[in-house]
Amino acid sequence: MLFEEFGFDNRILKSMSHLGFDEATEIQSRAIPEAMAGRDLLASSKTGSGKTLAYLLPALHRVYKKKALSKRDPRVVVLVPTRELAKQVFGQLRLLLAGSRFTSILIQGGENFNDQHKSLQKDPHFIVATPGRLVDHLKQRHVFLEGLELLILDEADRMLDLGFAEAMRAINAAASHRQRQTLFFSATLDNTQVSEIANELLREPSRVAVGQGFDEHTDIAQHVLLCDHLDHKEALLKHLLLGQTIKQAIIFTATKSDTVRLSESISQWGLTTQALNGNLSQSARNKTMESFAKGQFTVLVSTDVASRGLDIANVSHVFNFDLPKQAEEFVHRTGRTGRAGFKGEAYSLVGPKDWVNFKAIEVFLQKTFTTEVIEGLEPKFKGLLQPKPVKQVIQKTKAKAPKKASKNLTKKPSAQPRFHDNQQDGFEAFKLPPKRFETPVSSDDED
Ligand code: ADP
Ligand code: MG
């Protein structure tokens, strides 16, 4: 569908021609008419398929064409899970609003609360926010949402993962009049948590799903390499980073401290790199992202704060140095490459500690990965086998053992997986790799 076919306000068409886009992507073609018709919407499509414009353009159209419900309250609120994404969406919105009389502000944690209060007093039409900080302002009565016309939740599932359910409910309750329209967008919306909150926040929503979260993203080549321990992972990473042409890469690690440590190693290998995690000050986070987006360094080493929504055209490679605990995050992390029709490469390094997560990802994606091996860096690790089924053990011993002993054996087998060492023809007790990294305790928190 062409953008001029939606019946958009001329100002929108002008902005689109500035962007150089004539034709809508599939999610845009299907979601925009639903949103323009005023319906609530649950919309999903793969990463990099243009969901941001699919919600921003109908929001703009509404504000341009319809009379405001309230003179002072914001008309559109966009909620996103991370500060980095908030900044990006805000940037896109500002470009679209340039030259119009409509105003927008960014409300996120880590920035000065009083400055945000002052900006709110100017009665902006649009707010892009992370949920926690917006709720802080609601509580302080710095902002009222009785006149809110459109509530948009981008990456709604991630906001739930980060514990924003209550904040989302509070925002919903502050804007619970009948005329409000609500839109949910993500690449992965199929889970019970999302359905529950969608039931609370959305009214008879239309469902637009272009493909499924687990559909193979044909523009992203997935590579999986098994590894034995952390030194092996680093050797593989070094080989992969130095052995191919990398425009820009994002490496995901499980912990904040690993981003720093790994970034130091990468810099010793002669590549320009910076670490990003939730421990950094907001200004450091902003600086790092701005500099990465401008191409001023090659490798960003990050926790999941960079896994959602970030759109940086030059990212040719994504590496999972550790696999994410939540299977959906695999889709989002690897989706930082292969965007808007470009090709990308994604590498996942799977050690014994990643195995359970790796299997969960295969189940989620409904696919089995083939693993690749690099000459000279072959792994001994071939995957973990499940413990033997209990039944067999019981039957074997039942005949011989007296009643008392067999009682013990009916206990569940240890959940500890066993390491299948290919060198031997059998099992070997699973050995933990040398402990050098902090064990992941929680994901990188946001507000
Ligand atoms: P998603 O939210 O689905 O991951 P984004 O909204 O971040 O994707 O868009 C990914 C990229 O595609 C952005 O760089 C955006 O400018 C570009 N894009 C969006 N819509 C179009 C379009 N209709 N034609 C070409 N490129 C587009
Ligand atoms: Mg997005």
Image (cartoon, rainbow, N blue to C red):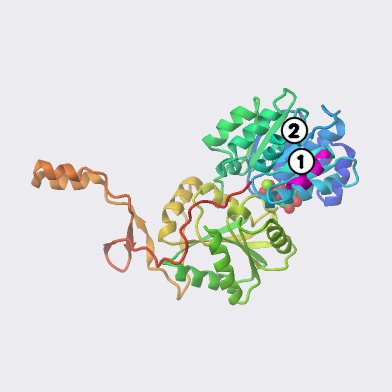
Residue 99, compared with residue 438, is above or below; it is above
Q: Which mark is residue 127?
A: 1
Q: Which residues are magenta?
A: 113-121
Q: Quadrant of residue 353?
A: bottom left
Residue 252, compared with residue 72, is above or below; it is below
Instruction: Inspect this view and state whether residue 32 appears.
Output: yes
User: Depth check: 177 or 329 in front?
Assistant: 177
- Residue drawn 68% across the image and 39% down it: 136
Q: Tag 2: residue type?
A: Leu
User: Depth check: 151 or 217 in front?
Assistant: 151
User: Depth check: 359 or 342 in front?
Assistant: 359
Q: Quadrant of residue 144?
A: top right
Instruction: Inspect this view and state whether residue 188 appears.
Output: no
Give the x, y percent position of residue 393: 20, 48
Q: Tag 1: residue type?
A: Ile
Q: Residue furthest top?
A: 178
In the visual, does 396 lie left or right of 223? left
Whether residue 430 appears in magenta in the rendering, the answer is no
Give the x, y percent position of residue 74: 79, 35
Give the x, y percent position of residue 106: 76, 46
In the visual, does 415 lie left or right of 123? left
Q: Quadrant of the N terminus?
A: top right
Whether residue 115 appears in magenta in the rendering, the answer is yes
CB contact under 8 Å: marks 1 and 2:
no
- Residue drawn 50% across the image and 56% down it: 323
Q: Which mark is residue 150?
A: 2
- Residue drawn 72% across the image and 31% down it: 34
Q: Residues within 10 Å of mark 2 (few under 14, many from 20)?
A: many
SS state under label 2:
strand
Residues at marks 1 and 2, CA–CA distance in whole angstroms: 11 Å
